[in-house]
Each structure stands twice: as structure tokens, then as C-alpha cells.
Image (cartoon, rainbow, N blue to C red):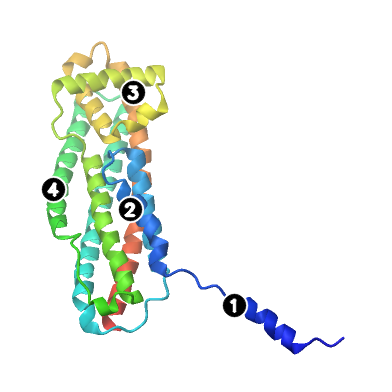
Amino acid sequence: MTVNPKIVHHSRSKSSPIKPPPFPLQFNEHLYRLQSSEGASTSQPLISYKLNGLIQLYSNMCQLACIQQDVPKEHHEKVVDFLLDGSLWLIDVCGTIRDFLMQTSEGTQRILSVLRRKLDQHEVAKEVSSYFSSRKMVRKGIVKSLRAAQSFGKKFNTDSSNENHETISFLRILEKSQTISVYVLKSLFSYVSGSRKPSETSKWSLFSKLIHSRQEQTDEEDHSKRNKFEVVDCALHMLTRQKTITCNRGVLIKTLRGHLEDLQSLVLDFEKSIECLCRLLIKSRVILLNILNH
């Protein structure tokens, strides 16, 4: 049986390939979700959600293969320089956070070791003092890094004749991503630094809640809302107080060990996320350098 070539040709013309939507549209929903959470509280689940969202956003951007088209250098050179500065700051901040998390992990491990060996009050106080000294240095580093963040997140202008160009679109998306990254890292900084000088009343109030939450196993939602860094800080303060030594020391140590282990687990999760984000930021920086040198 002979097939009519006209029919074949006609049937093919109907099934023309469907073009994917312009790539900026693929990021709108992702950017919106991250931006919509800016006014929310800095709870641990929300911060983890934001970090994972950033990782996915940068991962998708780094996979783009459609930004190699040429565009006059004068239209984007200043923009790329601006974004390169932003990416360098973000990479440095990720390094600062990673170093802090490692210090925290090492400090909590030393305290756990002291508690397990049941050393005397002097040895415990020594490790606790070392832990708080490290926390104090971290807070200073956080303040310094946040001051540098004020110069980033500004809007840039591009030639309107190139508004729809894919390279310009990519730069705009990256600019928005950097702005959101600054906000997310600020939230993380705020969370890990904890309350700087909690009052005596707030310490005892939280201490009471910590004891009862472990003994009565209160609901998980209430537990997740508490800042795990603040929880450990409070428990360590109480451990070195004479008022808690006689009647509550044994209960407090048991409670503290549980919260230290919780903090270690959280720190490990944060470390993995920051490490992944840092690698993607480096990749995005390479893309920017390629655009600049194209």
C-alpha cells in the first residue's frame, strides 16, 4: 500500500513543537514564594525552608544554557560588576556562617563530653565559659557582616532596548535572587546569634519551660518555635548558677544534654545547606564572569 506524501506532510505540519515559556517566567513563582515570607518570623522551620528555596533557585539558574547570546558590553558591564560584588559578599558571608557553625558544633561536643564524664563544677564552668566567649565573637562578626549588606539589594537600570534580551533577563533574576539572599542570611544571622542579653526573669521562665517540656513531652509545634541556640544558652546559664545546683542540677543536665543534641543536629543541617548554597554562588559568579568576558 502506497502512502500519500501529502497526507504525511499535512499531518506533520499539525504537530509543530511547542516552545517552552521564556525562562524568566519559570522563576517568578519561586521568587514570589521567597519574597512573601520576608515578613514572617525567624523560626527554624521557616529559615530551613528559605535556605532550601534559595538552593533550588540558584541551582535552576546555574543550569540555564540560554544566556550566551551577545549583547553590547556597555549595556551590562556596570550591572555585572555590581552583581559580582554582591556574589563575593554572599560567598564570604556563607564562609563566616560555616565557620561559626563548625565552632558551635565543636563547642557543644566538648560540653557533652564534660557532662558524660561527670566532671566537677569547675570543669563544666570552664567549658561553658569557652562556649560563651566563642558566641560573643560570633555576634561581633555578624554585626560587621550585616553592615556590609546595606550596600546590596539596590535596583539597577538597563537600556530599555535590551529589556527582553535573555542575558538582561538573567541579570535581573540574579539581582532579585541576591536581594532575597541578603534577607535570608540576615534571618539566619539573627537566629544563630540568639538573644544578646536575656533578663533574669526570661531566663528562669524559659528554664522552667525547658524542664517541663522534656518531662511532659509537649507538642512538637511548640518545641520547633523555640530558638535552639537561645535554649542552649539559657540552659548553660542555669547550669552555672548556684540556685540550680542543689535541687535541679541532675534534671537540668539531663535536659541540657537533650537540647545540645538537638542543636548539633540542627547545626549539621544548616552546615549542609550553607555548603551547597556556597557552591552554587560560586557557579553563578563564574557565569557572570563569562558574560563580562563574552
- Label 1 and label 3: CA atoms lie apart by 66 Å
Identify residue type, mark 3.
Answer: Thr
Find residue 101 and report its horizontal and vertical position in percent.
Answer: 28, 46
Find residue 110 and report its horizontal and vertical position in percent.
Answer: 29, 36
Q: Secondary structure at mark 2?
A: helix
Badge 3 vs badge 2, beta-carbon distance below 8 Å:
no
Nearest to viewer (mark 3 / mark 4): 4
Badge 1 vs badge 4, beta-carbon distance below 8 Å:
no
Badge 3 vs badge 4, beta-carbon distance below 8 Å:
no
Give whichever of discs 1 and 4 has the lower sequence position: 1
In this rendering, the answer to whether 170 lies above or below 180 is below
Q: Residues within 10 Å of mark 4 (few under 14, many from 20)?
A: few
Q: Quadrant of the C terminus?
A: bottom left
Q: Secondary structure at mark 3?
A: helix
Badge 2 vs badge 1, beta-carbon distance below 8 Å:
no
- Label 1 and label 4: CA atoms lie apart by 57 Å
Nearest to viewer (mark 3 / mark 2): 2
In this rendering, the answer to whether 233 lies above or below 82 is above
Read off the residue under disc 2: 274
At horizontal 23% and vertical 69% (from top left) the residue drawn is 84
Read off the residue under disc 4: 143
Identify the image quadrant of residue 89: bottom left
Read off the residue under disc 3: 255
Q: Secondary structure at mark 4?
A: helix
At horizontal 29% and vertical 30% (from top left) the residue drawn is 114
Nearest to viewer (mark 2 / mark 1): 1
- Label 2 and label 1: CA atoms lie apart by 44 Å
Identify residue type, mark 4.
Answer: Val
